[in-house]
Image: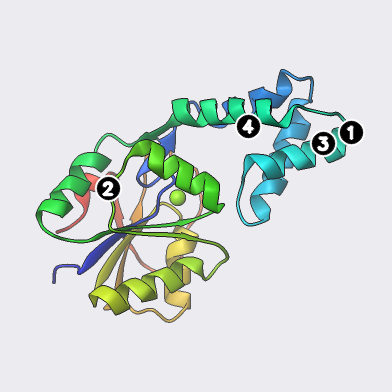
Amino acid sequence: MLPTCIAFDFDSTLSRILGGLQGIFAIFIKRDVPKELVKECYEESKKDGGFNIQGLLEKIKLKTQKSFDDNVIFFEFDEWVKSSIALYPESISVISDLKKQKIPVAIVTRGDQSYQKRKIELTRVLYDELYIVSGESGKCKALRELMQKYGNPVLFIDDDPRDLDLIREHGISENEVTTILILRDDNHHQDAHSVHSHLKIKTLDEIPL
Ligand SMILES: [Mg+2]
């Protein structure tokens, strides 16, 4: 049965950060903040509703008691985002094929509103629905809304096995949402194992349609 809608996670599913996170760290390391402290603050800042540069800067200020020119930091950060965010090579063609088949495309991503929005707009990826969610149940809630709007089954692709497991743990059945785990070569969730069963693909070209 053809899916009524295809929902994609964004980070590491449709897009990647070229060169990794070193560029974020470099903004502070060159201002004499120790690398370990930047990394520690980065990990902490991810916890409060998703990473953003304002949160990271505040944490670093608090721990170092240094002062920074906020606007220069924000400018340098945005320059880094612009030069680092990229879609995976096949993302554009897969989405344009879905458009041709008139299958609605949704992006369901967890994180900070403004940072996620900025990355998505920079990639110019096409979509019909966008959900930037927070918390463990955020993606499930978005998928329920998609089912309500388009019917079953919605197909959802994510690189994080935990997020796919959560869909089943929230009582959404396989008839409602088909779950696909994308195992990319640069996947940082490689060592995480899923509890529930999900289809597995290595690139978006392998989506079974
Ligand atoms: Mg992801």
Image quadrant holding the N terminus, namely bottom left
> The residue under label 3 is which amino acid type?
Lys
Taking the image as shown, residue 159 lies to the left or right of residue 105, namely right
Is the C-beta separation of discs 2 and 1 under 8 Å? Answer: no
Q: Within 10 angstroms of label 3, few (less than 14), some, or many (20 or more) residues? A: some
Which residue is identified by label 3? 61
Q: CA distance from mark 3 to mark 2?
A: 38 Å
Of residue 192 and residue 65, the one placed in the foreground of this image is: 65
Name above or below for residue 188 compared with residue 135.
above
Q: CA distance from mark 1 to mark 3?
A: 5 Å
> The residue under label 2 is which amino acid type?
Leu
At 36% from the left edge and 37% from the top edge, which residue is drawn?
Answer: 123
Which residue is identified by label 4? 74
In terms of sequence position, does the residue under pointer 3 or pointer 4 come before the other? 3
Which residue is identified by label 2? 126
In terms of sequence position, does the residue under pointer 3 or pointer 2 come before the other? 3
Taking the image as shown, residue 5 lies to the left or right of residue 51, namely left
In terms of sequence position, does the residue under pointer 1 or pointer 4 come before the other? 1
In terms of sequence position, does the residue under pointer 4 or pointer 2 come before the other? 4
Most extreme residue toward the left is: 101
Most extreme residue toward the right is: 65
Q: How is the image coloured?
A: rainbow
In terms of sequence position, does the residue under pointer 2 or pointer 1 come before the other? 1
Q: Position of residue 26 (x, y in %)?
A: 65, 23
Q: Position of residue 110 (x, y in %)?
A: 50, 57
